[in-house]
Image (tube, rainbow, N blue to C red):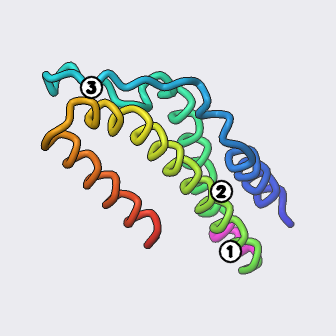
Amino acid sequence: MSDTATVVADDARALGATGADAATGSSCHAAHDADARQHGYITAKDNYLRRLRRIEGQARGLQRMVEEEKYCIDILTQVSAMTKALQAVALELLEDHMAHCVVAAAREGGSAAEEKIQEASEAIARLVRS
């Protein structure tokens, strides 16, 4: 495996190895005023940004691999690693959303709760299809 492929694989393993990154206790204070609402991921924002930047680096690494005409299977391996890293971020965002935004809406009840549950169901369906 090339040096670029090794770095990309190591980054993906580091990203997907544990969900502990998101265990920072995100909070979602669903206010009645939409402008004042905080999203569930906000306390872990720096962590999410760091992970997404690493994934962006993985994409650049894949571009380099193609430019350098690396072996097809090595490129496919890195595409898989990047996909898993993105899925890990998506699952943690969904967990934050469910634990905070959906729970807050459920406490309010009524149409707000129904909307958040429907929204979460649709997001889960999209993730399952991807």
Q: Distance between the residues labelled 2 and 3?
A: 39 Å
Q: How crowded is mark 1: few (under 14 residues within 10 Å), some or many (20 or more)?
A: few
Report the residue at 77% width, 60% height from top: 5
The N terminus: image quadrant: bottom right
**In the rendering, which numbered label is found on residue 30?**
3
Mark pair 3, 1: CA separation: 41 Å
Q: Is residue 71 above or below residue 93?
A: below
Q: Could you tell me if the residues under marks 3 and 1 are in contact, i.e. CB atoms within 8 Å?
A: no
The quarter of the picture where residue 66 lies is bottom right
Residue 67 among those drawn in magenta: yes
Specify the amino acid type for callout 3.
Ala
Q: Image point 13% across, 22% down: which residue?
A: 33
Q: In this view, does 24 lie above or below 51?
A: above
Residue on which disc 1 sits: 76
Which numbered mark, 2 or 1, is in the foreground of this view?
1
Q: Could you tell me how far apart the alpha carbons at marks 2 and 1 are, in whole angstroms?
A: 12 Å
- Of labels 2 and 3, the one closer to you: 3
For the image, the number of numbered tags is 3
Magenta stretch, residue numbers:
65-70
Q: Is 98 placed left or right of 63 in the picture?
A: left
**What's the residue type where badge 1 is placed?**
Leu
Q: Residue 6, how many percent across, how many down?
A: 82, 56
Query: Mark 3 or mark 2, which is nearer the start of the sequence?
Result: 3
First in sequence: mark 2 vs mark 1: 2
In magenta stretch: residue 52: no
Comparing labels 3 and 1, the label whose residue is closer to the camera: 3
Disc 2 target residue:
61
Residue, x 57% and y 33% (percent of image)? 50
Q: Check disc 1 and report its element: helix, strand or loop.
A: helix
Q: What element carries label 2?
A: helix
Which mark identifies residue 52?
none
> Residue 56 at what x, y percent from top left?
55, 48
